[in-house]
Amino acid sequence: AGRRRGEKTSMFRGGVRLVNAMSSTPALRRAHWQQTMLRVKDPKKSLQFYQDHLGMTLIDKYKFEKYDFSLYFLASLKPGETYDLTPGTKEAHAYLWDCDRVTLELTHNHGTEEEEEFAYHPGNKEKDGFGHIAVAVDDVYEASEDLLAKGVEFKKLPDEGRMKGLAFAYDPDNYWVEIVKREGALDNAPKFALSQTMLRIKDPAASLRFYTELVGMQLVAERHYPKEKGDFSLYFLCNKEDVEGVDLPPSTTPEAMAYIKENLYPKSIPVLELTHNHGTESQDGFRHHSGNEEPNKGFGHIGFLVDDLDSFCDALEQNGVEFKKKPSEGNMKGLAFALDPDGYWVEVIGRGLQVEEC
């Protein structure tokens, strides 16, 4: 994708929201959601699942022998797109740290694959924050049958439960992978396309401010369910550049959700789904597990590429954001970890990052 300087704010015009060009805070411009990180026990099994079963492409990889871990970055290609760089090379590294796409980062701490009883926490227990990732397909029933035939286990098949027409498969670490339907499939689209990362949030006002005003994402759609239908709300956000110049329908309308299914999912453009269980915002001391502390380790973080790391982090700090790691701290320079309102780790990476394997 071409690089466009500056982020956009949304304005209302004639019942639609025109996504427009610039953030009011120059230091906060040009942030792009680039990754969702999950820890995995056995990379061979995980790579087979995501590459062979879900058709994702390994974009890049790193091996850090000194620190006993490896990283694998996968992505769903856009319709008709090809990728011919070799993961682990300088060319692949350069592409990874300057690309405008969302990747799935799998982190392997060496040796876990040999520990029979070892398991990461996949989420979805009491107070867990991370919920699932999702893939979009043309036909949920056909895709589920295909995965079943390959030995994939399911939490929920399309016709089970109250919500018909969607499914939840298990990956090798028992993370939930939702299978959702996309509309208006494009020629040469991958059968499965990464489409969501879901996180539970305590207070939507605080989280939406962080992700839209400070990090610069675009709220595309929201859905609200009363007590008799579950008593929760969903908010769907994407990178602002993915909807640049688009007249978006009002976020609370059915047309807004249809826009995601008809225009984002078919192009392999994922959304960040924030789930709010009503009432948590008024509970003193309530906090979701972030995925980075025992015994709930599994999900690690989401990450954003920025043009100017120091200025971006300074602007976040001036807006009251706390940090797990600032750019100058720790062994890894050129990146930082901010904390969102729920304490989720948000990696902030300077474009053009250069990382030496060791």
Image (cartoon, rainbow, N blue to C red):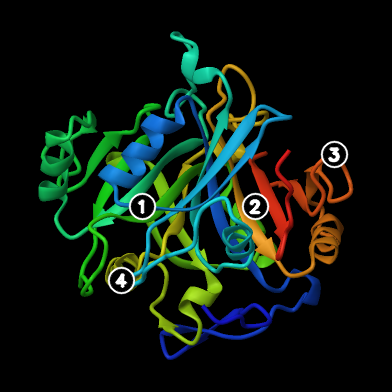
Badge 4 local density, few (<14 within 10 Å), some, or many (20+)? some
The amino acid at mark 1 is: Met
**Front residue of 220 and 141:** 141
Mark nearer the N terminus (3 vs 4)? 4
Instruction: Determine which residue is flagged by label 3.
Output: 330
Instruction: Determine which residue is flagged by label 1.
Output: 56
Look at 37% across and 27% down and name the residue there: 174
Alpha carbon distance from label 3 to label 2? 28 Å
Mark nearer the N terminus (3 vs 1)? 1
Instruction: Specify the label residue 206 is tagged with.
Output: 2
Viewer-side label of 2, 4: 4
SS label for mark 2? helix
**Front residue of 315 and 221:** 315
Say if 219 sits above or below 335 in the image: below
* Image quadrant in which you'd find residue 354: bottom right
Q: Give x and y (percent) for residue 215.
A: 66, 62
Q: Give x and y (percent) for residue 349.
A: 71, 56
Mark nearer the N terminus (1 vs 4)? 1
Instruction: Specify the label residue 247 is tagged with.
Output: none
Q: Are marks 2 and 4 in contact (CB under 8 Å)?
A: no
Mark nearer the N terminus (2 vs 4)? 4
Badge 3 local density, few (<14 within 10 Å), some, or many (20+)? few
Look at 61% across and 79% down and name the residue there: 9
